[in-house]
Image (cartoon, coloured by chain):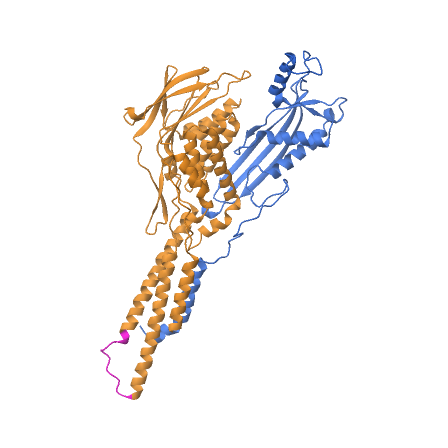
Amino acid sequence: MFRFFFSSLLASAVFLAGCSTVPLPPPVAYTGDALIDGKAQLAVAAPRDRVLWHYRVGATALRRGDSDEAARQLDDALTLTRGTLAGAGEAEAARARRMFRREAEKPFVGEPYERVMAAFYRGLLYWRQGEPDNARALFRDGAFIDSDNETKAFAGDWVLPDYLDGLATVKLGGDGAEALARARASSKHPLPDYDPEANVLVVVEFGRGPRKYAAGEYGEQLRFAAEPSRLTGATLTVGGQAVALPAYDDVVFQATTRGGRIMDHILGNKAVFKQGADAVGDAALAAAVMVASDRDDRRRPPPKTKEEREEQREDERERDQAAVALAAIGLFSKIAAAAAQPTADTRTWDNLPQYLSFSALRLPPGEHEAVLTFQDADGVTAASRTQNFLISVPPPVDGRTEDLVVFRSDLPN
Amino acid sequence: MNALTVRRFLPAAAALAVAAAFTGCASQGVKNPSGVPVTEMRPDERGFVAGTGVESQDLVTVTDRMARSILGIPVIAQAANPPVVAIEPVINETRFPINKDIFLTRIRTQLNSKAAGKVSFLARENMRALERERQLKLTGQVTASADPNVTEFLGADYFLTGKFQGISTRTSQGVSDYILYSFQLIDARTSLIIWEDVAEIKKQGLEDAAYR
């Protein structure tokens, strides 16, 4: 019986060794510069985390006005994501579904709201590069990513991807009415008609985006939290006009209205196993203690004959064996419960905004001083957040005027 | 608890517990644990990483078909002088960002390499450099083999262009993408569409449950 006990312990050790964690990436010497630090993190990131860092670095580069770097990072992220979803991450994804593996072991592609934001940012960059039809492709892809969810109640309800899809269509000589109608149906704020002659497209983001956390007894439930943004709108003053920039899209709302995932059910099953194995372990260990203590029960009358003494010894030996075996089962169940990994993947694209706004303006070629202010829910301007900058509208080339995409962010970059 | 009863069920319970625990750590399903070495593939071959978007095998299939189709048009096949064609960028209406020039570039190279002399293409994307060179010749900064005052840039007889349109569906069962690739040859003088052909490709895929 002791052989069995030690075999169980050995098996447990082997089992735990198989489930050991992978080594941590080498440390990064931080400089305090988000772009440099982000790239350094990307350089040492595990393959499963690369998309996450591409997203973060891409957003930072976009805010700094480095369109080429932002486009490179987002292209890498979108390509890796497409490859992963097309099957390149099949083995890792399968592992992440296993009982003793963490969901976070799968290659990160992001929750739908994160993927929509990647498509949105890249779409803006395509537009800035003079390719409105490829920009439109990504706005459509963003709307598509959000087109099917568990409850269908909030499917395809992003505003700006639809609105900009229609605007790009109008700019390309088509009819954007259908996309405009979709955008208006989802928007809480009135959306203006398209102006095909508008040559300056202003995109503004503000507020902190959602963070993920694991809820539930074993962290098996993916939840989102966000610090409520004090700012709820913005105003751009340029060329003698003040343009209201309401929060058309709320990224936190999009994250929290997506509904459940199939992975949530898998994690739920893992949690049930963990709970069950833990309970079995408790019961088996309690039974082992009970059997062991019963052996020494002094209330039984002492044996009188040789046969009774022999029978008692045999009984005690069997009880010893049973106690050890129950202890082994209990121990093994507790180890299995401890090894089960139901925790939800909380890797988060943590430099997303909460609100997105947009306006299309007509400005003549030349430099224009612009002032961007942010307002709270009462319309009070947060003076410390005011941004002053120049909008440089290029002259037409070969009689054609390229759209100028102005991107401003209230987030630190 | 009766020790005899416990002993009777002990081996089975222990075996069950061991089996249950090890099922979770089983190593099956880990494909290509050490990665896949670089593999050279034909561009018309479906690779081991294939999504529902526009891929090289679609490019090859569609452009080969269009090049063959263009060569069959009477105004090309029976023309006394090779018609001059200018290429206009395709319009992308799908949900996939694409390099818009690559389809027409491949059609052009297919036609130039497989049917040299039947059709000529204008290098309109190089017009700025060509115009600058002509100006240099006009000002005498560089030599000229012909009179630079005579405009020799050819006008187009036809415009070759295209449009990609898609229908995409997403459900809990997977993703489906249908793309219609249409190309046109337009008479530059009359605006008549003298040739048009389409290729259709539909793909479906199911994402891993870990991503749904």
The answer to whether A44 appears left or right of B53 in the picture is left
Residue B83 screen position, x and y as percent = 71, 22
Q: Residue at x 36, y 57 (%)?
A: A338
Residue B47 screen position, x and y as percent = 59, 44
Taking the view exactly as shown, the residue that stands out farthest to the left is A299
- Which quadrant is the C terminus of chain A positioned in? top left
Q: Is residue A286 visible?
A: yes
Q: Residue at x 35, y 69 (%)?
A: A326
Residue A199 screen position, x and y as percent = 46, 19
Please identify the dominant SS of the magenta region. Answer: loop
The answer to whether A185 appears left or right of B91 in the picture is left
Please report the bounds of the magenta region as a residue range.
A294-305
Picture layout, residue B19 above or below residue A182: below
Q: Residue at x 64, y 36 (%)?
A: B60
Q: The chain coloured orange carries which letter?
A: A
Picture layout, residue A250 above or below residue B210: above
Quarter of the image where one finds residue A301: bottom left
- Which quadrant is the N terminus of chain A positioned in? bottom left
Q: Colour of chain B?
A: blue
The answer to whether A256 appears left or right of B89 in the picture is left
Taking the view exactly as shown, the residue that stands out farthest to the bottom is A305
Q: How many marks can you see?
A: 0
